Image (tube, helix red, strand yellow):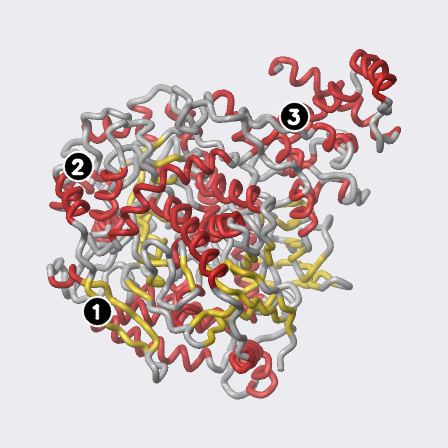
Amino acid sequence: MATATFRIWRGDRERGALQDYTTEVSEGMVVLDAMHKIQAEQANDLALRWNCKAGKCGSCSAEINGLPKLMCMTRLNTLRLDQPVTVEPMRAFPPIRDLVTDVSWNFRVKKGIKKFKPRPPDAPDGTWRMAQQDIDRVQEFRKCIECFLCQDVCHVLREHHHFDDFAGPRFFVHVAALEMHPLDVEDRVAELNQAHGIGYCNITTCCRKICPENITITENAIIPLKERVVDQFYDPLSRLFRVFRSRKSGRPDTPPGLKEDTHAGVKAAVQGGHSRSAGTR
Amino acid sequence: MPEYQTHPYDVLVIGAGGAGLRAAIEASSMGVSVGVICKSLLGKAHTVMAEGGIAAAMGNVDDRDNWKVHFADTMRGGQYLNNWRMAELHAKEAPDTVRELEAWGALFDRTKDGRILQRNFGGHKYPRLAHVGDRTGLEMIRTLQDHGIHQGIEVHMESTVLRLLTDDGRVTGAFAYDRERGRFLMFPAKAVILATGGIGRAYKITSNSWEYTGDGDALAYEAGAALIDMEFVQFHPTGMVWPPSVCGILVTEGVRGEGGVLRNKEGRRFMFDDIPELYRAQTADNEEEGWRYTQGDKDARRPPELLTRDHIARCIVREIKEGRGSPHGGVFLDISWIKERLPKAAEHIQKKLPSMYHQFKQLADIDITKEPMEVGPTTHYMMGGVQVDGDTQMSTVPGLYAAGECAAGLHGANRLGGNSLSDLLVFGKRAGRYAACFAKEHGDGRIDQGEVGQAAAAALAPFERRAAERNNGSEGPYQIQQKLQEIMQELVGIVRTESEMKQALAEIERLRERASRVAVEGNREYNNGWHTALDLPNLLMVSEAITRAAIEREESRGAHFREDRPSRSAEFGKFNIVVRKGSSGQMQVSRQPIPEMPPELKQTIEEMK
């Protein structure tokens, strides 16, 4: 039987290092199988997360040969086995142990997003009517399995650590699912602009490229949300209108918390966004 | 005295799948404080894997459907061992709980007139399953999760309950440990709801994840509660069989609901060969009629591929045993053939069964729009579990409730596909409501520090042994778990005999002895090996209960098939088998008569025959 070597990051909150494990591999195996085999036979205390083993729960996120992937959906026959396969935890989040990272920040961010608020029911029996074509695009967003790989790969979080003022691609997809839900009447655009810092996203599309559910994160979720932010806060005409209104009501005319570089990001996004989504508007 | 952090709640929910979350939402809406404790991260529980849909007689697609038909279907599927009160409440309340999900943001697939679309499924007379493609469970758990986090419920993720605490026969809380740091946690609670799911990890070939180790059953058993129907383990007929590493992963029944057919290596649709008497009148006797049924023809009867899971699993085993299986030891499930009937069939399949398409493409290099899948039975669901009151979901221990898969009663001898998600909603909600009522009516219980000390010592023992017994025959936990899985698969699987099951009991006893000497490496922080060691007693207890109950039931019924007792016995249809812990610590098995069904329910069953 063939063997392969896995170079696994082992460590805790403070320190760690890559360690080599060689194990037998067989046809059809995925990286998670190899981790389980090593765990059962060589390293009983190897820490990793997994549940469904079928790409449905989003628990076994890791960086395999440097690429963010689900371990359960990465077949060994897609990797070169004549050299060690590197398996590391998601690097954007604080390490806990081995392949397990502290992703609790994501759960806190979600709690800060305004919940679904439906319009009054359409029918006397308390139900609604929606056409399939009107929910298709939201159903795409609701495929998200919360593996947080998009968060891991996003440079705003990974390189620039904007954990305090940026929600990340996962939660733009979440907000998009709520904002484009045919029944929802809540308004989350102001938060997108401020607390969730959507302007930091400069649409490098890294998140969309690695999404294991193939959600078109950038084009279908983030850019339309950026457009809503621009419509509401940066449209020259409505801005002029707001100047007049604010003179009467005494409100400031620029939204707080906006930085110069963020603004540039939004502009870039808008230019890209209009050309791509023109047909859908 | 062990060190621990204390988190008191009025209601403690153990498990954060569909039942646990629905229970927590309901309890919290009644104004009591609610804590949820779950073994994984929030939103990763097994509910997320449910594919086909939620059974609810809304009648959106076929207006002949109503609760009575659903009730009769459920009872027939369960071979009349069901708790009829639960089957009645379930059929009546499921539609409202589905509509509730929609009000919380769930987006089900739609009918042409904009209502919730419903699909065909095995054992359901009419199209009844509200669904979202083949990822209904994800939609459900995400909806409950996103609704629940705004309700003031506290969630303790990646924590595991070691023991339920009792005082004077009543539950008073739970003692647990958190995985991240390995610290002990104390949850004093006025009422506790078990929503821990199933037992699939007792078997080698399973669609279940590492979490499904029968924790709820074992915790309840140790606390003195009765378990029933433990002999009924559902083997889903269609799991993946190849490649070996994905063996057991589920292939949704939705494939057959959309027109998929089962064939042996000779190309024969073998399901037409054996249609049980109970279903003959409602089953198509030719391929043409079966196809028309899947395409919504109301006058057609359903194809035999949509018979109940127990029956199909056995037919598949028969084909394989008699040498007509597929190359990797399964049979063929083919949805690609519908291209003969439908234009744009490939697109249709990808739209209706997207995750099946990806699963096979990525894991087995099979394009299901072009070629058949290979499938075989996989351990899927536990019909048995904690015995509960049909209305309140309270177990035989005051203050202890159970809902979802770890509770028993609704499904009897065999569960219909789709009835699980609705079970979670209907009885999760009921458990939440009645547990909250119980908490309001009762004060705090006393925490028995003796029990706590024992639980802590037992949990830490694998570390102590590491030093003391390293050279004295101690071993790691994974090998024992694997051995147990092999024994249960081989000896207490789809086809059972008394002699094999007695052999299994002896093996389980030997494994229990080995488990008592398990040692683990490393420290207490996020130690999967330690956790696996702590799972062993639960898995062993559940395996013993399944085996003993299966020996006691000397007949074949539903999911329980005995080669040495191949027919159904009217006598055995009159009672459930109960397992509880005897005063000497031995497992006791007894028979409990099924209460008489009220005349109006009897009449409903007659009308629907």
Viewer-nearest residue: B191 or B175: B191
Callout 2–callout 1 Cβ contact below 8 Å: no
Callout 3–callout 2 Cβ contact below 8 Å: no
Q: How crowded is mark 2: few (under 14 residues within 10 Å), some or many (20 or more)?
A: many
Percent of width and height locating residue B528 = 57, 66
> Label 2: which residue?
B283
Percent of width and height locating residue B566 = 14, 60
Q: What residue type is labelled 1?
A: Arg
Q: Which mark is residue A219?
A: 3
Q: What element carries label 1?
A: strand
Q: Which mark is residue B591?
A: 1
* Pointer 2 and pointer 1 on the same chain: yes
On the question of residue B461 being in view, the answer is no
Q: How crowded is mark 1: few (under 14 residues within 10 Å), some or many (20 or more)?
A: some
- Going from N to C along the chain, the mark reached first, 2 or 1, is 2
Above or below for A162 versus B205: above
Mark nearest the camera among 2 and 1 is 1
- Label 2 marks a residue whose chain is B
Percent of width and height locating residue B56 = 34, 38
Horizontal arrangement in the rendering, residue B258 relative to residue B20 (left or right): left
The tally of labels here is 3
Percent of width and height locating residue B3 = 65, 76
Gap in Å between the C-alphas at discs 1 and 3?
A: 62 Å
Q: How crowded is mark 3: few (under 14 residues within 10 Å), some or many (20 or more)?
A: some
Horizontal arrangement in the rendering, residue A174 relative to residue A194 (left or right): left
Viewer-nearest residue: A195 or A222: A195
